[in-house]
Image (tube, rainbow, N blue to C red):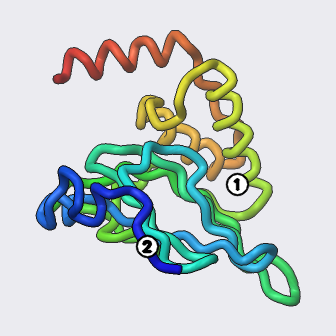
């Protein structure tokens, strides 16, 4: 079965072909215990279902999202990775990643299941504060990436830091 779940991605809704080209596309695959690519957080602009195990999700420029990739073969895990990205505007410079088109601004890139699991727990803690991880200060995701790569624990995200980020973002508009 092939189809579109969100009408604005097909061109039937308020988005025309030009605005669809402005969206970042992330290819997701789910084959239980073999290939499991999923979005951990982020506000999708739309979804295109390709078949039972594959779909494409779309993000508007500026949207922040967490993309988890895990794959295994008969001998064990092959890939364990989490990327936290910010979708880019058309024509903007970007970093390329497999399964993300055209690419994005990488805020965090962590590999290896033990570290990926720590990032997922960090995301859970942020949600426990009542904060959407997609709204977190992008500098915090960079902080988490740097400290984890150094083998250290990152500082927890706090409601005070989030409030400061929201004020700073508002001033910058």
What is the quadrant of the C terminus in the image? top left
Depth check: give the residue in front, 20 or 160. 20
Disc 2 secondary structure class:
strand
According to the picture, the residue beneath numbered tag 2 turns out to be 3
- Which label sits in the foreground, 2 or 1? 2
- Which image quadrant for residue 93? bottom left
Query: Which residue does the numbered mark 1 point to in the structure image?
Result: 116
Mark 2, other Cα within 10 Å: few <14 / some 14–19 / many ≥20? few
Q: Which x, y percent locates residue 98?
A: 46, 75
Q: Quadrant of residue 6?
A: bottom left
Residue at image point 51% right, 10% down: 160
Identity of the residue furthest to the right in this view: 75
Residue 127 coordinates in the image, percent (x, y): 63, 28
The answer to whether one can see residue 109 in this image is no
Q: In the picture, residue 32 is in which quadrant?
A: bottom right
Horizontal side, residue 144 vs residue 140: left or right: right
- Mark 1 element type: helix
Q: Which mark is residue 19?
A: none
Apparent side of residue 31 relative to residue 160 in the rendered image (left or right):
right
Q: CA distance from mark 2 to mark 1?
A: 32 Å
Q: Is residue 35 above or below residue 162?
A: below
Residue 4 left/right relative to 111: left
Q: How many marks?
A: 2
Identify which residue, 73 or 32, lies in the foreground: 32
Q: Position of residue 10 (x, y in %)?
A: 28, 66
Q: Residue at x 64, y 37 (%)?
A: 123
Q: Residue at x 87, y 87 (%)?
A: 75
Q: Earlier in the sequence, mark 2 or mark 1?
A: 2
Q: Are marks 2 and 1 in contact (CB under 8 Å)?
A: no
């Amino acid at each position: 079965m092939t189809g579109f779940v969100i009408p604005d991605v097909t061109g039937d809704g308020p988005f025309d072909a030009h605005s669809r080209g402005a969206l970042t596309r992330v290819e997701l695959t789910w084959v239980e215990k073999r290939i499991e690519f999923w979005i951990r957080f982020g506000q999708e602009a739309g979804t295109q279902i390709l078949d039972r195990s594959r779909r494409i999700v779309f993000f508007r420029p500026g949207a922040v999202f967490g993309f988890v990739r895990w794959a295994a073969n008969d001998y064990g895990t092959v890939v364990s990775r989490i990327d936290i990205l910010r979708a880019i505007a058309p024509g903007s410079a970007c970093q390329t990643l497999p399964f993300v088109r055209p690419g994005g601004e990488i805020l965090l890139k962590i590999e290896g299941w033990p570290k990926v699991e720590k990032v997922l727990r960090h995301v859970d803690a942020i949600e426990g504060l009542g904060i959407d991880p997609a709204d977190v200060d992008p500098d915090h995701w960079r902080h988490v990436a740097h400290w984890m790569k150094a083998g250290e624990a990152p500082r927890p995200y706090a409601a005070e830091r989030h409030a400061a980020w929201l004020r700073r973002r508002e001033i910058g508009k």
